[in-house]
Amino acid sequence: MIKNKHNKLLTQISIIAAITLIFAIIMPLVLPGFRLKLLGRFLSLAIVALGIDLIWGYTGLLSLGHGIFFALGGYAFAMHLKLQLPAGQLPEFFTLYGVEKLPLFWQPFHSFPVTILAIIIIPGITAAILGYLVFKNRIKGVYFSILTQAALLVFFNFFNGQQKLINGTNGLKTDTEEIFGILAGSEPAQLIFYEVTIVSLLATYLICRWLTSGRFGRLLIAIRDDETRVRFSGYNPTEFKVLVFAISGAIAGISGALYGVQSGIVTPSYMEVAFSIEMVIWVAVGGRGTLIGAIIATLLVNFGRTFLSEQFPEIWLFFQGALFLLVVTVLPNGIVGWWQEYGWVKLQSILGLSYPLMTYPHIEKNPEFQLEKEKIEKSKLGKGFR
């Protein structure tokens, strides 16, 4: 049994390594610059999908406001890029509104290391505060979803109206700024951001897999399935929900920073309700609680949307709606869930491969029975010596 688990782990690592190498080395060679940039943006969106799967698929918290944390990460990195100017100069939009001195909260973003920390910490802390205010009152289910969407609207309207501080509806452009002496919108810089996105996606996936594979993951699932029983078992679900919501928010911040720098601009539109709902759709299409499904569905849905919007610009939204209805009605467990429950078995049947069943002609040959029998015998021997 241990050997099988070891072989399965090695197989998974080999597949992940192979896919990573394909995206990191082969894709930049075969895709034109525009398509590669699109792929980089979609891979960055897969990061936020992992965060949503962590809280929705494993913990049962359906957030419709993750655009908040996504945008905060994007703005943090965009502010750093905007400050890559000669000493004493201000970003151009400040002069348009008569601002003569850099606002205090902009000052820390002169530093690149501080900016990297801010991309993670600011969305994470914001998510923790919002989560604590909600979870301490034991608000859950649809009420939690409504509250996250209400918070999203508050942030959207606030950022929209801050013309003097963050350029309001116009947002902050990133492709015309420099980072380490290289134009952020140039092909060499975009290739670097693409590779960083791949590394970040892989690291996020491994972290989420680690979090969900041990006791912490089992506790999250227990909270999702029966929070009351978890509370009666001596655990405080509030603390764990706040923690996992903060982690999910930090993941969204990383995603927003990478998406913004590859899109060329960060605007309050990142906090539009429709965008946050799309994030949930990606997870639903891929399969809740699968992690890999969130990545696959994000790429499929976004590439499908790009293709359909190019071929059918007037009706492509109907295709997206039909896809979501199809998943809800026909594939409730998503693409990966369907594959695990039915698709793989069906493929084996078509190929004529034997499908191993965990049955035994005699109960004595069952390894679990033998293990239990040995434990009972040792227990009896121990009592006999007493």
Image: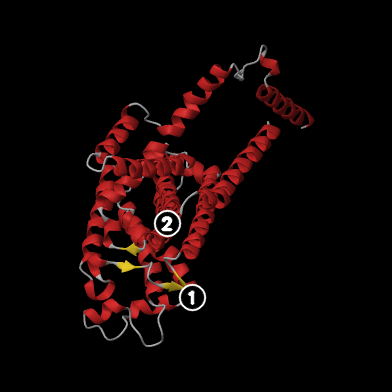
Return the mark for residue 50: none
Q: Is residue 344 visible?
A: yes
**As shown in the figure, which amino acid type bears the numbered disc 2?**
Ser
Give residue 232's quadrant in the image: top left
Question: Residue 88 at x, y = what percent?
Answer: 37, 88
**Is the residue 168 above or below the residue 273 in the image?**
below
Q: Is residue 59 visible?
A: no
What secondary structure is found at the residue carrying circle 2?
helix
Q: Residue at the right extreme?
A: 385
Question: Does residue 109 appear to the left or right of 158 in the view shown?
Answer: right
Q: Residue at the top extreme?
A: 361
Question: Residue 229 at x, y = what percent?
Answer: 41, 39
Name the residue tied to disc 2.
255
**Is the residue 4 above or below the residue 250 in the image?**
above
Q: Residue at the bottom extreme?
A: 88
**Is the residue 6 above or below the residue 44 in the image?**
above
Tell which of 121 and 167 is nearer to you: 167
Give residue 381's quadrant in the image: top right
| Other residues around mark 1 within 10 Å, as few (<14) / some (14–19) / many (≥20) | few
Tell which of 347 and 6 is nearer to you: 347
**Where is the N terminus found, in terms of image quarters?**
top right
Question: Does residue 131 appear to the left or right of 168 in the view shown?
Answer: right
Tell which of 341 and 274 is nearer to you: 274
**Is the residue 45 above or below the residue 343 in the image?**
below
What residue sits 26% from the left and 61% below the top? Answer: 155
Name the residue tied to disc 1.
181
Question: Residue 304 at x, y = what percent?
Answer: 36, 40
What residue sits 29% from the left and 46% below the top? Answer: 277
What secondary structure is found at the residue carrying circle 1?
loop
Q: Which badge, 2 or 1, comes first in the chain's sequence? A: 1
